[in-house]
Image (tube, coloured by chain):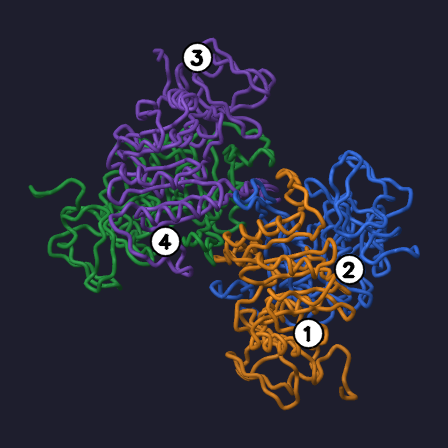
Chain colours: A orange, B blue, C purple, D green
Amino acid sequence: MTDDWVEGTAKEGDLVQLQGSGYKSHILRLQAGAVLQTHRGVIRHDDVIGQKWGTRLQSHQGNPFYLFQPGLADLIREIKRTTQIMYPKEISYVMMILGVGPGKRVLECGGGSGALTTAFATMVGEEGKVYSYERKPEIQALARSNLARVNLDSRVVFKLGDAADGFEERDVDALFLDLPNPYDYLVQAKASLKGGGYLGMLVPTVNQVERCLQALQHHQFAFVEVCEILLRYYKTDWDRLRPVDRMIAHTGYLLFGRSVDRLDALEEPEEVEGNGGEL
Amino acid sequence: MTDDWVEGTAKEGDLVQLQGSGYKSHILRLQAGAVLQTHRGVIRHDDVIGQKWGTRLQSHQGNPFYLFQPGLADLIREIKRTTQIMYPKEISYVMMILGVGPGKRVLECGGGSGALTTAFATMVGEEGKVYSYERKPEIQALARSNLARVNLDSRVVFKLGDAADGFEERDVDALFLDLPNPYDYLVQAKASLKGGGYLGMLVPTVNQVERCLQALQHHQFAFVEVCEILLRYYKTDWDRLRPVDRMIAHTGYLLFGRSVDRLDALEEPEEVEGNGGEL
Amino acid sequence: MTDDWVEGTAKEGDLVQLQGSGYKSHILRLQAGAVLQTHRGVIRHDDVIGQKWGTRLQSHQGNPFYLFQPGLADLIREIKRTTQIMYPKEISYVMMILGVGPGKRVLECGGGSGALTTAFATMVGEEGKVYSYERKPEIQALARSNLARVNLDSRVVFKLGDAADGFEERDVDALFLDLPNPYDYLVQAKASLKGGGYLGMLVPTVNQVERCLQALQHHQFAFVEVCEILLRYYKTDWDRLRPVDRMIAHTGYLLFGRSVDRLDALEEPEEVEGNGGEL
Amino acid sequence: MTDDWVEGTAKEGDLVQLQGSGYKSHILRLQAGAVLQTHRGVIRHDDVIGQKWGTRLQSHQGNPFYLFQPGLADLIREIKRTTQIMYPKEISYVMMILGVGPGKRVLECGGGSGALTTAFATMVGEEGKVYSYERKPEIQALARSNLARVNLDSRVVFKLGDAADGFEERDVDALFLDLPNPYDYLVQAKASLKGGGYLGMLVPTVNQVERCLQALQHHQFAFVEVCEILLRYYKTDWDRLRPVDRMIAHTGYLLFGRSVDRLDALEEPEEVEGNGGEL
């Protein structure tokens, strides 16, 4: 940080977001002399350093780019990935239901490129911890580098391993399985969860949901919920307001349950009531 | 805390969740000698103190209740309210897009009964802060008591006031307006937001969305998004898997924007791309 | 018909619809001296006879009722039933995809109370025919009476029988199975369908959909489509326009296929294209 | 028809559907010596004439094509158009609510390329009639040719004209306005509708819905309904069953009302009931 740094402005070393046409974002760490190449022109880092947050800048072609401090959703959307990532609409709801927040200890298996890991690491704060298991070294390496890019890697313990071999942690607050066959690892999940701890899963097919439901019951997980989230955007012309033409029809089915000692058959919520508490 | 308290068990003074049939929860603070009355029987706090988290207990009628440490979603669903609250499906997405997390300074206006306040207060952690403005004393009093109930009131600065008079804070990271006419207070919102700060709103009608969109453009908020979230649950019988019969059709329209210095006409995302970045 | 009957007015013997508050309808055949009892008062048929269609009448309590010639959707919604009926949103789409229209020969099995039967009978016109198979005599009796009530029974051939025993008809244009286990009767269905004829099914669970898909492939049905239809209403205040609070989350999954002589593995439509032709 | 024509086979002069990979269809009228060019090879009409319906044929490249008698949905999806057409999911529901069926007299304005016209003409049968108003000669010419292609033009009376000048017909059973500003023509619509007749409209934006609702009330249309239809397809692998990735987010808002003599303020259906009768 130089002596003449003014509060509210970007300085060398900052992680910044430059967002422009089509809402497209670039996330980068400012470095004197460096240059950002985009489809809409070139931006020199030196022209960004010292600018106020929220300022409109432009590429050498004159295309607009706004300078922002990136938020979690921005980081997730722009994350470098080789495999399918989870999206904000699922990640946010998963964290809400799993009670992920400052100070919590959260375990994930199937960390992939680190989108969910980034979210968990952000929300557990300095006092919490994320344990991230992944089987493939090259994918975990990408996740590590993604977390390091945003200075969150100190909050994550990366372990290379197979869910079948179990997890070393005990009494974690929440555990998320992002695997094709999470129903095969509920014994391992239960061993790591605290009593009453939250388990979450995301699977793409109903066939997998069926297997998950059987396994959740068998392994004493109570208050099971299965749901899907649909998000529809609208066009932003106030006098021609309508939904956009196309939308994501499906990302996956979310399942949640709580680890208990003994499972009774529990009545599900009455439909009229609102389905598991929502409303 | 007594000397013979065992780790992983509930003790006097703990905030606990007792969840039973129909997924119905009771949130209470344990107190020796106290008693919980429910529609499914009576539970003596003394029978809960000392029990392990995740244990199945029962009321005097024999109905099952599971003992849990409550998570944020549980607290929100059971919050005492006199007015309509926001629900987990919106609250979680709002926090994701607004970048609410540990250390953040977040301002809300129209705090109501405190559901959103509770979520914000949880997520900003010990280092962050929530500024909660509300016009009606009796409603703010209820919010204060709800936050105190869960020991989060120290993170919230409650101010009785009208959005029209503006907010005292400057450079907040995010600001949420839960009012019928948020479009009237964008000058006040902008004055409090840091450059590039996130603004969020929830309005029930399209008429209000139209007015919000006009105001957002007029007051230099960029990268505006309008969306709605539909959440559909499934019944949990693995061999008769299907969606529930009824669902919430509408809670409200969410709007988001970022505070900038000068607003260009920006191309919205192409539909095929994924609507504002999601996918 | 009396000598003084005026065109555009209701006469004795007409099937009429009286619709009032809450959009609630009563379907009745006018008869001199008869009386309609409703929760909102009494209406004498004599006060209806001779009135113009579209006229506002009122019960003895002064509650409004509008006099209409009922349309198909009105008849379906008010049909007397003992079992769950299919609703307009599915019935209409089924008829569209199955190509049900004037002159067609359509077979249904699992006729139930006759809602779908009524729709089929209406649309095939005088030249077409509906063959309706049902296993339970009392249910078919109700269907017969419902069809007779609207003078459509001459277009329907009711047969008491089990799908397992097959259907007598050959070369029908379309065939609809409204049964819990339609996948068990595809041989029988195929025997009755013309070459390239349309098969349709409605099942409530994904487990049944899985079985249907296997059977459809096994029994040489091509261009299979599986879909669900969500219908959301809006409140009708123009200045407080928004969706209603609650909606039907699920009625059933619709499956369609075409009977062919030999089934190749066919590429499904590309997602981007629009999913089986829609758009 | 030649002497050696066999029942259940295609003959020269027949309108046929050839459907292949990606569910793509070609609709054509068989003509000896003619040839169909497709992206997946060439098919000689002579190789189709005499074949049974439902038979698998193949192009010269060996790509499969199934021979069918086309149904209404197939015709609509393949119709030649220069402007946006209505799709089966809306057309089917519109016809259901409007009570379009054999013998009915139906008027449409804004006929466009004739997709809806084709559906109306099919369903009104030989005894019914469709009156189709359109302002632009070249578009109506396309519609005429589309209807002639499927031999339904005798059921349609095409009139070139502006809705503002009103319609010549009186006492039509149903009237559909497929225009950007249908709210401007409710006087004209009412003049043509029978008492209690059904009016329908499709508009893309909520702004237009607001204007329609005001106009419907002002011009004495009762039992107004506003709705939208979402259709989601599933992939057809029985053991990897899930929704497709993307779907149509919006086509338009449908509005319906019934023409009455005098409009009272009517209570809308209670949400819990099922929204206007559906369920």
Q: Which residue is mark 4?
A: C277
Is B105 situated left or right of A181 in this image? right
Q: Mark 2, mark 4: which one is toward the viewer?
A: 2
Q: Which residue is mark 1?
A: A69
Tell me which amino acid carries mark 4. Answer: Gly
Quadrant holding the N terminus of chain A: bottom right
| Callouts 3 and 1 in the same chain | no
In the picture as drawn, the residue positioned furthest to the right comes out as B3
Q: Mark 2, mark 1: which one is toward the viewer?
A: 2
Q: Chain of mark 2?
A: B
In the picture as drawn, the residue positioned furthest to the top comes out as C33
Tell me which amino acid carries mark 1. Answer: Gln
Q: Chain of mark 4?
A: C
Task: Give the CA separation, mark 2 to mark 1.
Answer: 22 Å
As drawn, the label of residue B122 is 2
User: Dot 2 surroundings within 10 Å: few (below 14), some, or many (20 or more)?
Assistant: many
Q: Mark 3, mark 1: which one is toward the viewer?
A: 1
x then y, percent, for residue D154: 23, 39
x then y, percent, for residue A258: 69, 52
x then y, percent, for residue B135: 81, 51
